[in-house]
Image (spheres, helix red, strand yellow):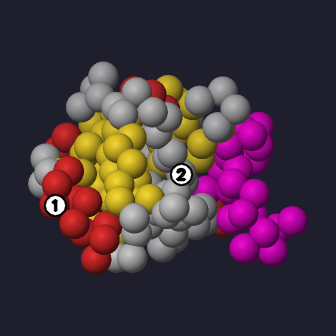
Amino acid sequence: MSLLNAEWIGHRKAFRLFDAEHPQQTVAYEADLKTAAQRAGDEGYDGVDFISESAKVHIMPNDIVLHKPTGETWVVCGVNHTDGTLIACGYPFPSKAKVEDCELLEARYHVEPQSIEEINILKSHGLDNYIDVRSAIFHDLL
């Protein structure tokens, strides 16, 4: 049985539908679960699996996030999935935050992996654990 995942995105007031195999790739946004289930069928899935608000957010480099404590919108420079923290691009660098304090606004990693510049600045600050291995391989750095 193949299910499409559905997670509530508050700022859009809609459910984001995505395949668990490709969590950064949005299939569609739907206003309610009934319509989401219909869309899942249209896309060739057996239904939807609702992902609760407490489920772990999968944020990646270059994604755009809302940092809820400050209300600021950030572009993510790097993510340490082991300790659940991320570093935002910009000044002051490095600005660290807990992943759980951020809401994914726009998934960009699938379009633009972590850049060589981001990788180099993370290295220069001794933050190698925030470097995305897939991006480093993409840039022939590994």
* Element marked by disc 2: loop
For label 1, the SS is: helix
Determine crowd level at label 1: few under 14, some 14-19, many 20+ residues with C-alpha closer than 10 A: few
Of marks 2 and 1, the one in the foreground: 1
What label does residue 88 carry, if any? none
- Coordinates of residue 56 in the picture (x, y in percent): 49, 34
**Residue at 25% from the left image edge and 60% from the top image edge:** 37
Mark 1 highlights which residue? Answer: 35
Question: Would residue 95 appear left or right of 83 to someone viewing this image?
Answer: left
**40 w.r.t. 105: above or below:** below
For the point 66% across and 50% down, which residue is it? 121
SS majority, magenta: helix
Judge by depth and name the residue closer to the eye, 22 or 126: 22
Using the image, determine if residue 88 lies above or below residue 48. Answer: above
Q: State the image coordinates of residue 104 (x, y, percent, origin top left).
A: 36, 46
> Quick check: can you spot residue 109?
no
Is 121 inside the magenta-drawn segment? Answer: yes
**What segment is highlighted magenta in the picture?**
118-142
Q: CA distance from mark 2 to mark 1?
A: 28 Å
User: Label 1 sits on what residue type?
Assistant: Thr
Query: Residue 70's quadrant in the figure?
Result: top left
Q: Is residue 28 above or below residue 8?
A: below
- The residue depicted at 77 percent of the width and 43 percent of the height is 128
Residue 88 visible in the snapshot: yes
- Across and down, in percent, residue 101 comes to 40, 27
Residue at mark 2: 60
